[in-house]
Image (cartoon, rainbow, N blue to C red):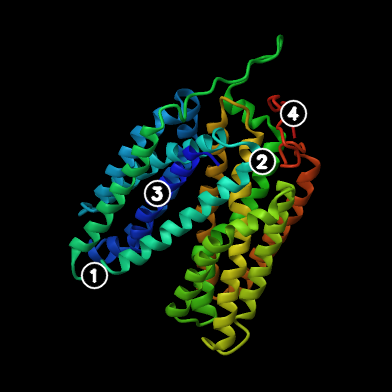
Amino acid sequence: MTAHVRLLLAGSVVSAFGRGMTLPYMYVYLAQVRDFSPTVVGLALGWLGVAAMVLMPLGGRLVDRFGARHVMLPLYVLEAVAVGSIALATEPWHAFVSLTLVAAGASGLAPGQAVILNDETQDSQRHKVFALQFAGANLGIGLGAVAASFIVDLDRTSTFVTLFLVNGVTYLVPALMLLSLRHVGARKPAPEADPGVAVLSPWRTLADHREFRSVMLVVLIMTMFAFSQYEVGFSAFAVVVSGVSPFWLGIALALNTALIVGTQLFVVRWSEGRSRTGLLAVAGAVFAGAWVVLGTSALGPSGGVVAIVGVITCACVFAVGEMLLAPTVPALVNAMAPDGIRGTYNAASMSVFNLAGIVAPAMAAPLIGYGASGAWLVLVIAGSLGAAVLAARLATVVPSGQNGLASELPAAAPQSQDA
């Protein structure tokens, strides 16, 4: 791993620290400190997800067009201003404007960082680098949440203002690090087409890439029924159905983060030499197992030992699935993406995660809230297992070089095929 990569990953930890300071308190701040109605807060936070999903493809295209460096540097500044401006949101429309700017900044930062990490590492090291990025983000968010807990005070608006302003400043740290790396993130030209072959637009190239479409379908199903269900579905089931107190839920979430930070490298070492599609299949099976364990937490007395052990065990098993899924998807996406339009591919992949993040809460909240928790549990178990089966079948679709089974990737651009 080069010094450039280590510096970029360190910058990601700092910005994640800032996010961790505000992430747990966004709803509380808007609803209880600024006194916005729950409906307005829900719409505002939902709008953030929609705006991110809509703007992400544009951000990825800008990365391809101008280079990650030239896009990310001004967007880090925009993100700093946008996050800091939430501290001044005294009216609902202020919050909507700020959150829209936050989504605009993230639209280019996320795919841009993925492109840079891909370009600065060899294929054999990419899974490890993306794993470290994921573990570092969890570490930063966890430390930020702990730090914020010593600052925040519901009776003092200034404490929340401090959190958002500090979060904004943390985005300037990775910007300065990237600014110091003068030759990192330059634009890469798209590969020249063979004579007689029509040059397709990036969107058409992506849409015609049958293998990529297949991978994204699996990722959508897995994130919709597993990865994105964790924040709402898992927490709601644990509290509403299993009767676990917020204290034990917090312990479960903390152990999930600690496990990711402490064991991600061990999971990476175990993953070496295994196909990326195979790792996705294992991740789906692990997620299904975690949901089964969560189901057992409701078998004993509400809030009892069985419930507490089941919820904590589910969170720990879920962490294993996260450690398999989170680094594998970007490594696979970047292996499949041609030079020159890699930002577009990364943005498409991240839009899939954003879409699942919008659908998953809409699925979990009404089912669990209106007493159909059993139906929700069956859905997430079946969806996770279905994703695992589909992921295993991807081995016959994805070329071995892109699947992590060869040291060098084929240079050819993806073939245009119909499904």
Where is residue 316 shown, x and y percent of the image? 58, 70
Determine the residue positioned at 27% across, 58% down: 163
* Secondary structure found at label 2: helix
Where is residue 275 shown, x and y percent of the image? 74, 47
Q: Can residue 16 be seen in this view?
A: yes
* Residue that carries the numbered disc 1 in the rendered image: 154
* Secondary structure found at label 4: loop
Residue type for callout 2? Ser
Q: Which of marks 3 and 2 is nearer the N terminus?
A: 3
Q: Is residue 280 visible?
A: no
In the picture, which quadrant includes the N terminus?
Answer: top right
Residue 319 appears left or right of 72? right
Residue 270 appears left or right of 190? right
* Residue that carries the numbered disc 4 in the rendered image: 417
Residue 82 appears left or right of 55? left
Judged by depth in the image, the label closer to the viewer, 4 or 1, is 1
- Asked if labels 2 and 1 touch by Cβ distance under 8 angstroms, the answer is no
Q: Which of marks 1 and 2 is nearer the N terminus?
A: 2
How packed is label 3: few (under 14 Cα within 10 Å), some, or many (20 or more)? many
Where is residue 5 shown, x and y percent of the image? 49, 40
Q: In which quarter of the image is residue 291?
A: bottom right
Task: Relative to 164, say whether 186 is above or below.
Answer: above
* Residue that carries the numbered disc 3 in the rendered image: 48
Task: Pick the residue in front: 5 or 39.
Answer: 5
Residue type for callout 3? Leu
* Residue that carries the numbered disc 2 in the rendered image: 124
How packed is label 1: few (under 14 Cα within 10 Å), some, or many (20 or more)? few
Judged by depth in the image, the label closer to the viewer, 3 or 1, is 1
Query: Distance between the Cα atoms at labels 2 and 4?
Result: 28 Å
